[in-house]
Image (spheres, grey):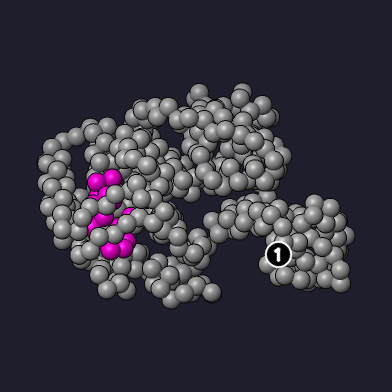
Amino acid sequence: MVSKYDVFYIIAKKGEIKISQILEELNKSKNEYNTIFNHILNLEKDNLIKRKKEIKVLHNKKSIDLFNLISFCIENGINYNLFFRKKMLNLLKKASKIEMFSISDIKLNHQTFKTYIDFLEISGFLLIISKKPLKCKLLRNQFLLDLLNYFHIKTTFYESKKKNLLKPIKRELKKYKQKKSNPILLKKYENLEQINFIHSSLNLEGSPVTLPETQNLILKKIVPEGKSFDKIEEVRNYKKSVDLMLKLSSRKQKLNIELILEFHNLAMNNFDHSGKFREKNVIIKKNPLFKTSDWKKIPIKINKLMKKYEKFESKKTSLENLFNFVSYFHNEFQRIHPFIDGNSRTTRLLMLHILRSHNLPVLDIPIGFFDIYLDLTKRSKKRDDESFSYFIQELILMNLKKINAINI
């Protein structure tokens, strides 16, 4: 069923348009004319559009904010109409205030609650800690805050208590290891997750290529329209680097400086300094508090980091120690910032390499984690390895739950 938000987005995209053209764009027959017209009346009442001979969007804050919310969902393959329902907004308002919530905190009927929870989990905005008893965690994300703000719903997100997630991780890891995997279905799943990671990692760097475009580019070789050549090549090059990481981590191959340079060289193939440590100082734009190493100290710091890595890998370790070390390695490498460009995407690749080498099938950073990740890294006021270790635990738990949920 067509919603008024579907109609609004068509009008906003086309500039000026007639109802007959809206029907055509939505692939609807003339029988739907009255439905579309009623939506137009409601949009006009909401001060979002104006009717004359043709219909056009009013350029005000309300229309711009709505367009941005819908565009965000489309770019990330998310059903925006479900987000705009009153019951969903009420759930988001209540869930944002409680770090671990259940159906008793929201007060919805069971089926509606399940529909919304499943949607939020699939979309990457919700982490289910446990099902019996049910404990859910809404991930703090700017999109959710903007969504609630658009509908004039005020909320204050919970302060995270950073509880240890070792028990649920071990429980999901046990399920994962006990499953008799269908290699064909598993490969298909990992291929899709790889695309999700490529999109997520590049999106965190400001890439304009959407998730549907990334999927079409990699799976169908369809080049997205309106995107520059360098942004398209960015996706293709990063895939080569991710492919190598998946291949070598499955073999439990240890990292070394030469391999790190190769990862970077593949990811930044169209860049003059790909696969080479920088020879000048750099700064993080918009965050002067994020200090990067003096370029002359890079070889010493990288060698020191790799010695700690070799020492760590030389001994058996617990999951807790693994999370703590990966947190340290990620943050240390990112702050050394050894390259002119491509540091963060390489850092994330190395993080996944270490985790996957230790039999943790992590291959995605869901969109709900974006703001949490950035607040702990390039937007951070100070380094916090402990909080980042907790972030890794949440990330691993969500990835394990996703792979355990599929029938393999």
Residue 282 screen position, x and y as percent: 29, 59
Quarter placement of the N terminus = bottom right
Residue 390 lies in the magenta-colored region: no
Magenta part of the chain: 331-344
Residue beneath the point at 46% across and 74% down: 228
In this rendering, position of residue 150 left or right of residue 291: right
Residue type marked 1: Ala
Residue beneath the point at 83% across and 56% down: 44
Residue 344 screen position, x and y as percent: 33, 55
Answer whether residue 367 is visible to the viewer in this image. Answer: yes
- The residue that label 1 is drawn on is 12
Residue 348 screen position, x and y as percent: 32, 52
Image position of 93 with respect to 206: above or below = above
Residue 213 screen position, x and y as percent: 51, 66
The residue nearer to you, when weighing 162 against 58, is: 58
Residue beneath the point at 51% across and 27% down: 100
Helix, strand, or loop for circle 1? Answer: helix
Instruction: Write down the quadrant of residue 387 in the picture.
Output: top left
Residue beneath the point at 25% across and 60% down: 281
In this rendering, position of residue 261 left or right of residue 14: left
Q: How many marks?
A: 1
Residue 332 lies in the magenta-colored region: yes
Instruction: Write down the quadrant of residue 326 in the picture.
Output: top left
